[in-house]
Image: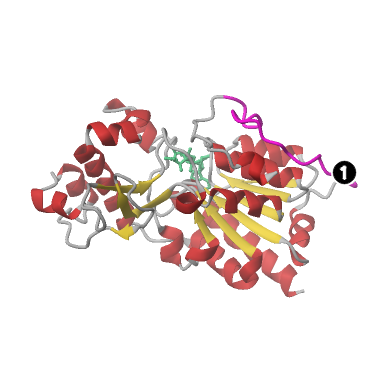
């Protein structure tokens, strides 16, 4: 089954209903539900046994840290679209055409991320990782690096859209990732970073340490595909297929792999918990499922309380 999905899947903005991916996906038969268990405790009790607990996060988990979301009122795709369309800037095509502008823009976004600090929701997911260890996976769409800075371990954190603190070869001579050079002169203050123009010295640092070609931000662009080495594509699907509970936090379900993750897990009978200040396609799925629940409210409020409740259940 996973191999059936392992064909290259483009990142798409969700033009079709979230349940029908562009690429045919083979889902397991729908599980037979024995009566409604859709209260939070009953769903969390599924996690008390064995099986995987998966958290799937989006920009909403970092909103309370002061990082704009993408499609919210002040979102990156909403505000800056007066200047450029996201499909334009966040693409390999744009990088080929205007690499310095693209670097400029990502280094400005990075300054925004570096000014932010992980919040209670990030911290609660670190606690959950410590509680469950190998029985936990964190799949994040966020490139802001806040989960790692909160203490989530790299090996169990699948950054499926990359990480803005890393660069790699612009010519793909290797899949190696390098932290951004610390000698870059981009101001830490994001407003100053937005106005700052990269110097020749900066551009000389943004080179592939292997082959010397221009480097690129380690983020997944709209005209690119998920894969395993760089974006943990198959690992994410594998985790979804073995999940007993999926905790979704702060995403509008706009991209492909998260849709596969939630649909695969739901089809495999997992309990689905959606935490979001607003409705979204995953909240609708959770509402429809007898083993699902949509908690409407802020991540900083709901994630710590869900984790506390889960910890009490697991501690027995
Ligand atoms: P979006 O901006 O599309 O959605 C953010 C979601 O978070 C919305 O559903 C909000 O209602 C919710 N939200 C906002 N504040 C919240 C809070 N305090 N607590 C809980 N929920 C809150 O961002 P994503 O869904 O993450 O991909 O976007 C997915 C991907 O699309 C991104 O990773 C990026 C973007 O294009 C790429 O660039 C490949």
Q: Quadrant of residue 137?
A: bottom right
Say if 37 sits above or below 78 in the image. below
Q: Residue at x 69, y 38 (%)?
A: 285
Indicate the quadrant containing the N terminus: top left, top right, bottom left or bottom right: top right
Q: Residue at x 73, y 62 (%)?
A: 51
Asked if residue 133 is among those painted magenta in the image, a careful observer would answer no
Q: Which residue is mark 1?
A: 32
Is residue 143 visible to us here?
no
Circle 1: element type: loop
The x, y position of residue 44, in whole percent, is: 74, 59
Residue occupying the far left of the picture: 200
| For residue 206, side relative to residue 282 (left or right) | left
What number of labels is visible? Answer: 1
Closer-to-camera residue (220/48): 220
Q: Residue at x 31, y 59 (%)?
A: 178
Say if 292 sits above or below 188 in the image. above
Residue occupying the far bottom of the picture: 315
Label 1 CA crowd tier, 10 Å (few <14, some 14–19, many 20+): few
The x, y position of residue 179, in whole percent, is: 30, 60
The x, y position of residue 251, in whole percent, is: 53, 43
| For residue 5, side relative to residue 39 (left or right) | left
Asked if residue 31 is among those painted magenta in the image, a careful observer would answer yes
| For residue 294, side relative to residue 157 (left or right) | right
Indicate the quadrant containing the C terminus: top left, top right, bottom left or bottom right: bottom right
Q: How is the image coloured?
A: secondary structure
Q: Residue at x 16, y 42 (%)?
A: 195
Q: Which residues are magenta?
A: 16-34
């Amino acid at each position: 089954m996973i191999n059936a999905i392992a064909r290259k899947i483009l990142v798409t903005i969700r033009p079709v209903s979230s349940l029908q991916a562009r690429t045919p996906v083979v889902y397991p038969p729908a599980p037979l539900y024995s009566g409604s268990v859709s209260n939070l405790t009953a769903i969390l009790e599924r996690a008390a046994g064995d099986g995987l607990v998966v958290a799937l996060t989006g920009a909403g988990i970092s909103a309370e840290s002061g990082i704009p979301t993408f499609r919210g009122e002040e979102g990156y795709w909403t505000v800056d679209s007066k200047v450029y369309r996201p499909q334009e800037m966040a693409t390999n095509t744009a990088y080929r055409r205007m690499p310095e502008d693209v670097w400029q823009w990502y280094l400005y976004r990075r300054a925004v991320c570096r000014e932010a600090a992980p919040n209670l929701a990030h911290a609660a997911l670190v606690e959950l990782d410590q509680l469950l260890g190998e029985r936990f996976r964190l799949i994040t769409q966020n490139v802001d690096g806040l989960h790692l800075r909160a203490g989530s371990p790299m090996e169990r954190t699948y950054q499926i859209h990359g990480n803005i603190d890393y660069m790699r070869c612009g010519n793909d001579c290797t899949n190696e990732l390098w932290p951004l050079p610390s000698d870059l002169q981009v101001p830490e203050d994001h407003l100053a970073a937005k106005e700052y123009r990269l110097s020749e010295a900066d551009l000389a640092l943004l080179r592939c340490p292997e082959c010397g070609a221009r480097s690129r931000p380690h983020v997944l662009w709209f005209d690119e595909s998920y894969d395993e080495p760089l974006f943990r594509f198959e690992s994410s699907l594998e985790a979804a297929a073995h999940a007993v509970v999926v905790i979704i936090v702060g995403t509008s379900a706009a991209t492909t792999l998260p849709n596969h993750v939630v649909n695969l897990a739901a089809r495999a009978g997992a309990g689905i918990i959606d935490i979001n200040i607003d409705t979204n396609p995953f909240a609708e799925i959770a509402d429809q499922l007898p083993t699902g629940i949509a908690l409407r409210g802020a991540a900083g409020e709901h994630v710590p309380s869900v984790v506390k409740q889960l910890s009490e259940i697991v501690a027995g």
